[in-house]
Image (cartoon, helix red, strand yellow):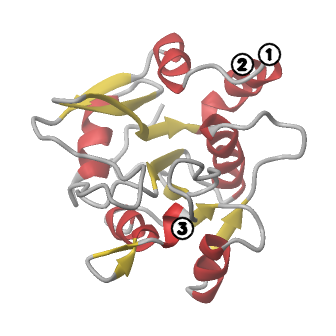
Amino acid sequence: MTKPGTAAAFRLAGLVLAGGRSRRFGAEKAMALYQGRPMLDWGLQVLAVGCHPLAVNAPPGSGAADLALSRGLAIVSDAAGDPDGPLSGVLAGLVWARDQGAVWLATVPCDMPQLPDDLVARLGQAAGEGPGARLETVDGRQPLCALWNTGLIAPLRLALDGGHPPVWAFQDQAGMAAARLDVTLANRNRPDDSV
C-alpha cells in the first residue's frame, strides 16, 4: 500500500459522516451551530487540510446534503439495503473515493467540532503501510475519526452483509492502527452539550 502523505500515486479523499438520525439531539446535528457555524463546517475544515476531493455522507434532502451541495461538494448516500449505522456511510464513502481515483479515505463525524487541524496527518503517520488508522484520545476510541484504505471495501461489505458490527470491532479485525492524541475531544449528542 502507498503510505498516506507520500508522493507516489497517492490521492486522499475526505468524508464527513452526517447520515445519523440524531435521535438524542432532537434536530439535525450537522446543522446545529457551534461558534456561529454549522457543525458540518468544522468537519469539512479539518478534512480540507490534506484531502481532495471532499464529500458529505447524508440522506438526500437533509440540511447537511443541501449545505454540501451549496458548497459544490459531493453527497454520498448509504446504499439501499445496507443496515443503519456509520459503517454503511464509510462503505459508501470508500466506493466513492475509489471511483475518484483515491487510495485512502479520511472520515470524521459531524458532531466533533474541536478536532485538530493536523488530524489527517496524524492518522496517516499512524497508518504506515497498514490498512488504516483511527483516533484514540484520553476519553478512549474515536472510531469515526479514521483513515481507511480502499482495499477495505470488500471486507467491510462482507461485514455489513451480516448486520452492522461495532465500528471499533471492524477496525480491530481489519488491523487498523491507533493514532493517539492526549486531549479530550467531546462530541455533541444533545443540543445543550458544551464542547
Depth order, front residue of 15/102: 15
Which residue is under mark 1?
A: 162
Q: Residue furthest right?
A: 81
Q: Locate residue 37, reporting x and y percent.
A: 36, 80
Whole-angstrom CA distance, mark 3 to mark 2, is 26 Å
Per the image, label 2 sits on a secondary structure element best described as helix
Which residue is under mark 2?
A: 159
Per the image, label 1 sits on a secondary structure element best described as loop
Residue 110 position (above or below residue 66): above
Q: Locate residue 9, reporting x and y percent.
A: 49, 51
Per the image, label 3 sits on a secondary structure element best described as loop
Depth order, front residue of 193/180: 193
**Amino acid on which disc 2 is placed:** Ala
Q: Are marks 2 and 1 in contact (CB under 8 Å)?
A: yes
Is residue 33 shown left or right of residue 83?
Answer: left
Whole-angstrom CA distance, mark 1 to mark 3, is 31 Å
Which residue is under mark 3?
A: 53
Q: Locate residue 80, reporting x and y percent.
A: 89, 46
Is residue 43 shown left or right of residue 131?
Answer: left
Which numbered disc flags the more N-terminal residue, 1 or 3?
3
Q: Quadrant of residue 126?
A: top left
- What residue is shown at x 45% (from left), y 49% (from top)? 106
Q: Residue furthest top?
A: 173
Q: Quadrant of residue 180?
A: top left
> Nearer the viewer's eye, disc 1 or disc 3?
1
Q: Locate residue 120, reporting x and y percent.
A: 32, 50
Residue 174 position (above or below residue 160): above
- What residue is shown at x 56% (from left), y 58% (from top)? 26
